[in-house]
Amino acid sequence: MTRVYPINSRMPDQRGHKGPSIPLMSAVVRLDDFLVIIDTGYPGPERFTKLLAQYGFRPPDFGMVINTHVHPDHTGNNRLFADARIVVSRTDYFFAREYSHELLATTDPEAVLAKYYPEFPPNRRRKFAPYARDLAVKYWSDDHIGPAVRIQWIEDGPELPGQITLWHTPGHTPGHYSVEIRDRDFAMLVTGDALPSRLFWKSKLRELVPRHNDAQFRVSKEKIEAFEGFILGGHDEVFSTADGRYVKGEVIEGG
């Protein structure tokens, strides 16, 4: 039996945000006796370990980590899972590495943001650039996604459990992947930031953070919107595509 446990670690207050905290979602997938975690939240090993322990999980129990993309709120606790294979996009990693290195070396983060996210509006770029550099200073290291010996690049076709399929959903970042989990009459798509929340489902709402490529984002979003089943976005709870309603309960079960 396939079971999915949504893990909500919530976003930290990074910029004096005064409203309600934003969900930050990971997903534990139990496939009989094999455990997979999709995305690992912001760095905070002690807190993340406690969230897993609520369901009886420990990091050494996991055989695989899958990252939808290489932003720090989705890869921050990868190194907790010391015995797991880490499945992630090579394209996304090297894009994030080059971008972060330039931010760390520059006195003009706005220019770096313009180079790597040229479609981001200039007025937003000016406001976002100091925050982007601050993220790189706080969170980037070349090995933050885990030791090289544990990494398997998606582009090399790593072996995955039969219930899991990866969808290339670029746009938010160049190497973004969503994760489909399917078992008999059960289907879920973990979309990362290709569809960050139900608010974006079949709507024209735009997120405030930069997109790498708007046209790719829209194509990926349309592909996701054709999916039938449950969706878990990167920053929202699980909802059903059948009626758009949030799914109640802590565990989603397949056949």
Image (spheres, helix red, strand yellow):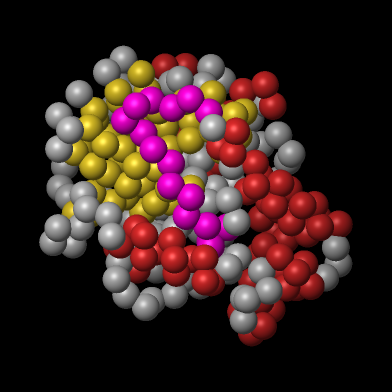
Direction from residue 231 to residue 133 in the image, left or right:
right
Residue 105 vs residue 195, the one in the foreground: 195
Residue 137, horizontal then vertical, whole percent: 74, 52
Direction from residue 243 to residue 67 in the image, left or right:
right
Which secondary structure is most common in the magenta stretch? loop
Q: How many circles with numbers are drawn on the protein?
A: 0
Examine the rendered structure and indicate whether residue 147 appears above or below residue 20.
above
Task: Determine the image quadrant of residue 9.
Answer: top left
Residue 234 vs residue 219, the one in the foreground: 219
Boundaries of the magenta span: 158-173
Q: Residue placed at 38% from the left, 25% from the top? A: 161
Residue 162, horizontal then vertical, whole percent: 34, 27
Asked whether residue 237 is in view, the answer is: no
**Is residue 169 magenta-colored?**
yes
Q: Residue placed at 24% from the left, 28% from the top? A: 2
Residue 80 vs residue 162, the one in the foreground: 162
Residue 116, horizontal then vertical, whole percent: 71, 65
Residue 78, horizontal then vertical, whole percent: 55, 33
**Which quarter of the image is occupied by the C terminus?**
top left
Asked whether residue 151 is in view, the answer is: yes
Examine the rendered structure and indicate whether residue 224 appears above or below residue 183.
below
